[in-house]
């Protein structure tokens, strides 16, 4: 298949341009942009999880202190 058609990869993904290198560069840029957005979202979600964890940890400490009984 690859020996007969050097552009098989582009046809496989529905790319019918005459200059596949430009199309490939455009697709790579689109993917890099998507990865950048996902990384930013991941940082935001990680920060939110750390805030929740710290809040729960603080509440557990408060409840433990309030319910502490001397024996």
Image: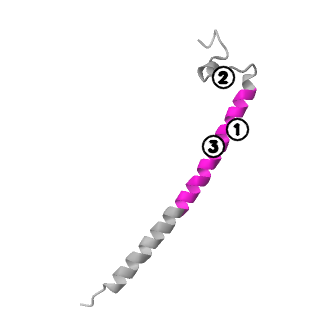
- Look at the numbered disc 3 and give the secondary structure of its residue: helix
Label 1 vs label 2: CA separation?
Answer: 16 Å
Looking at the rendering, the stretch of residues picked out in magenta corresponds to: 22-47
- Look at the numbered disc 2 and give the secondary structure of its residue: loop
Our reading of the magenta stretch's main secondary structure is: helix
> Which residue appears farthest toward the left when viewing the image?
71
Q: Residues within 10 Å of mark 2 (few under 14, many from 20)?
A: some
Where is residue 66? Give x, y as percent: 34, 85
Residue 19, labelled with which disc? Answer: none
Query: Would you name the residue on which mark 3 appears?
Result: 34
Residue 51, above or below 29: below
Query: Would you name the residue on which mark 1 appears?
Result: 29
Q: Tell me which residue sits at (65%, 12%) in the image.
A: 5
Looking at marks 3 and 2 on the same chain, the residue that comes earlier in the sequence is marked by: 2
In magenta stretch: residue 5? no
Query: Would you name the residue on which mark 2 appears?
Result: 15
Q: Tell me which residue sits at (75%, 19%) in the image.
A: 18
Label 1 vs label 3: CA separation?
Answer: 9 Å
**Screen quadrant of the N terminus:** top right
Where is residue 2? Give x, y as percent: 61, 14
In magenta stretch: residue 42? yes
């Amino acid at each position: 298949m690859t020996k007969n058609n050097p552009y098989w990869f582009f046809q496989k993904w529905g790319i019918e341009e005459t200059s596949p290198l430009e199309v490939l560069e455009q697709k790579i840029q689109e993917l890099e942009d998507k990865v950048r957005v996902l990384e930013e979202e991941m940082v935001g979600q990680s920060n939110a999880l750390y805030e929740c964890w710290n809040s729960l940890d603080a509440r557990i400490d408060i409840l433990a202190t309030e319910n502490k009984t001397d024996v």
